[in-house]
Image: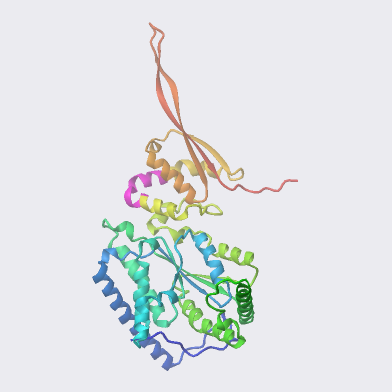
Amino acid sequence: MSQWRFRPVMSSQTNPKSEKTEPTEEAKNHQDLEVKDAQLIFNAVWGELVDKYGLENLRFPKELILLGGAPGAGKGTNTPFIMEARGLTCEPIVVSSLLNTPEMRKIKESGGLVGDKEVIQILLEKLLEPQFKDGAILDGFPRTFVQVECMKRLHDKMLQQRRDFYNTEYRKYFRQPIVHIMMLFIDEKESVARQLKRGQEALKQLEDDKAAGKAVEGDARSTDLSESSARGRYRVFKELTYDALQSLREIFHYHFIDAGGPLREVRQNIVNELEYQSTLELDPITFDALREIPIASRILEHARQDLVNRLDGYVINNPYLFGKVVQFIQDSIMPIVMNHAISGIAQINTENKVLEDPLAMHMFIDIFSERGYQANIDLHKIQVPDSVDLNTGKITCKMKKVWRLQIRFKGSVIRRG
């Protein structure tokens, strides 16, 4: 069985963007063996999960963020900000903490090694917890080539479940999976400087607490007190986490964050990288249904996950009505909106019967919200004379329903002067 292993450390001068040399035949053979290891490990873990929970209950998060960062890059500082940007409320899953559970300690105390199979087993079970259904941040995974291969197989299984349950009552539990790779990167010099600064600050805090008579728990991280240890941590990061996540960048959405500047700049870099894109969030069928409606310059992220879930739900549960609303927008609304591109506001009156269904009005507003517009609907009931009794002079009226629509968006900026 493959163990949690370290490969030979790379040079600290390696450029993260440099091209890799062609692997030797020995290295290729070693990788082939690890691929086979991963296949055996993942299949074994998956089989155990199916037996324990049932295939229809293997409901993994819709969104997974694989978070990696150089020592001192501010991963802990920026994780809450990343969670806020993605609308996630659950604490990140720190893989190293999972390995300190009673089960894992029992393995280590009995002289055993915590291998890749144990890591995959405990991580997948954690991801099945209902609190992570919308998304989870994985801190410190994957860290080995075997774990990389298992991550690929998990994604394949999630896609397969999506297909297998698509026409069943369980469809809503198996949404289109999204995987992001977030890499907070700083160079070795900056990393070492930040680690040593953190160590000095931790020592000072301990001394201040002791002087104030406060209870002191723990100690400063030993690697933050030695320059050689700090450099060693950086090299381990480059060899393990960095290489592992780099190998997945052609499969999943990869975000390389320059974390070397001030905190405000780093967070702006994160926002820029995580800017909402429909192609990443919506089920492909839903996106195809909406693709003819032009997208605004920026999509509002407010209540993003609820909005995406509602739109996917319309397509699943009310496809006919949803199609009618989309067609109504394309044929009757967008031509008028596009004529108001300069002002950024269009006022439209319509008597189209499709809006008589309250659900259709919700669809209308959600569709425009997803496309980056702000839509408002008001229903006005107007008494319209229909007939006159010539003997009594009584006028009979009929009720006319008029929906007054207001569509707002960022209009064109015109230079005047």
Residue 315, percent from left and from top: 36, 51
What residue occupies the far bottom of the structure in this picture? Answer: 26
Q: How is the image coloured?
A: rainbow
The span shown in magenta is: 314-327
- Magenta span: predominant SS is helix
Residue 216, percent from left and from top: 55, 74
Residue 379 placement: quadrant: top left
Magenta run includes residue 245: no
Q: Nearer the viewer, residue 211 or 339?
A: 211
Magenta run includes residue 322: yes
Left or right: residue 386 compared with residue 218: left
Evaluate whether residue 327 shows in this view. no
What residue occupies the far top of the structure in this picture? Answer: 391
Against 228, is 339 above or below?
above
Evaluate whether residue 371 shows in this view. yes
Against 87, is 391 above or below?
above
Residue 332, percent from left and from top: 46, 40
**Residue drawn at the location 51% of the way across and 79% of the way down:** 242
Image quadrant holding the N terminus, namely: bottom left
Q: Nearer the viewer, residue 73 or 280?
A: 73
What residue occupies the far front of the structure in this picture? Answer: 213
**Residue drawn at the location 38% of the way across and 78% of the way down:** 119
Residue 329 placement: quadrant: top left
Against 348, is 410 above or below?
below
**Residue drawn at the location 45% of the way across and 47% of the way down:** 366
Q: Nearer the viewer, residue 319 or 256?
A: 256
Left or right: residue 139 compared with residue 163: right
Left or right: residue 70 compared with residue 28: right
